[in-house]
Image (spheres, helix red, strand yellow):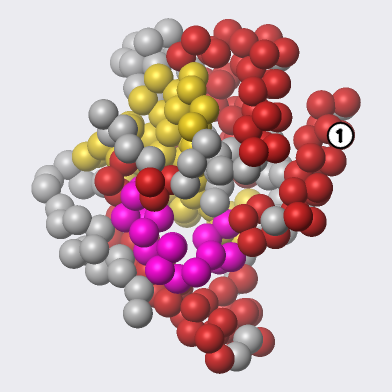
Amino acid sequence: MLLSLKSQIAFFRQFRKRFETTGAIAPSSRFLARSMVGFLSARDPEVPVRVLEIGPGTGPVTNEIVRTLRPGDVFHLVELNDEFVAFLKSRFSTESTWQAVQPQSTIYQQPVQDFETTEPYDFVISGLPLNNFPADLVSRICQAYLRLLKPGGVLSYFEYMYVRPIRRRVTFGSDRQRIRSIDDTLRTLCERYRIRRDSIWINVPPAWVQHLRKPVAAEPSGADAGLTTA
């Protein structure tokens, strides 16, 4: 209960300071978190995997991820917000479930589009508020998703229901064009790779969780696959 309150306070403080990169007024619900980790939870526990979480915030989805990790797994987190990084480090130091996987977990404080890895990931799980970003940044982030994911790997990310259709109707000028470009990028991504969409009504606001699989066969790069924006 105390941890949940601290998480809410930390999240709301960052929402007030940095809405453009926080994107919500409350951490994700446990129902959304479980959906985000659904494919990871269903993997073969005898086969080690590499997991990347992008934009973990205060760690509601991380908390589900750490419960699924097994010996030999590798878990990396990319978080830009310095207060969230400090909060995550505290959880790895003080919570028993998190402490158990701390030796196989690493936090990187940097933008995901600049993040490099020596080996791609079996699972990429992202909580980034893409609708808040410039359109060209969303395109680069989506390209990073594909670059960081192994062939056959699964990407899971969420978006709040009906946000873009509503904003297309109520915004004007450059912001309307931005939303349209983001919609084009994410629609192309889902049309090419989506394998399932979960509707999560018990969340603030309600959300869709998109699950996509990168093909095993060779594919063009993100830019060549139509993930650029106008």
The residue that appears at 79% across and 56% down in the rendered structure is: 16
Q: Residue furthest left?
A: 218
Classed neighbour count for the residue bearing mark 1: other residues with Cα under 10 Å, few (<14), some (14–19), many (≥20): few
The residue that appears at 72% across and 13% down in the rendered structure is: 94
The magenta-colored residue range is 129-145
User: Residue 173 location in percent, x, y?
Assistant: 56, 91
User: Residue 151 location in percent, x, y?
Assistant: 22, 39
Looking at the rendered image, the quarter that the N terminus falls into is: top right
Looking at the rendered image, the quarter that the C terminus falls into is: bottom left
The residue that appears at 41% across and 29% down in the rendered structure is: 51
The residue that appears at 36% across and 59% down in the rendered structure is: 140
User: Residue 216 location in percent, x, y?
Assistant: 17, 42
User: What secondary structure characterizes most of the magenta part?
Assistant: helix
Vertical side of 88 occupied by 187: above or below: below
| Residue hosting label 1 | 5
Can residue 86 be seen from the camera position used here? yes
Vertical side of 218 occupied by 225: above or below: below
Vertical side of 159 occupied by 215: above or below: above
In the picture, residue 120 is in which quadrant? top left
| Left or right relative to 214: residue 87 | right
| Left or right relative to 109: residue 32 | right
Look at label 1 and name its amino acid: Leu
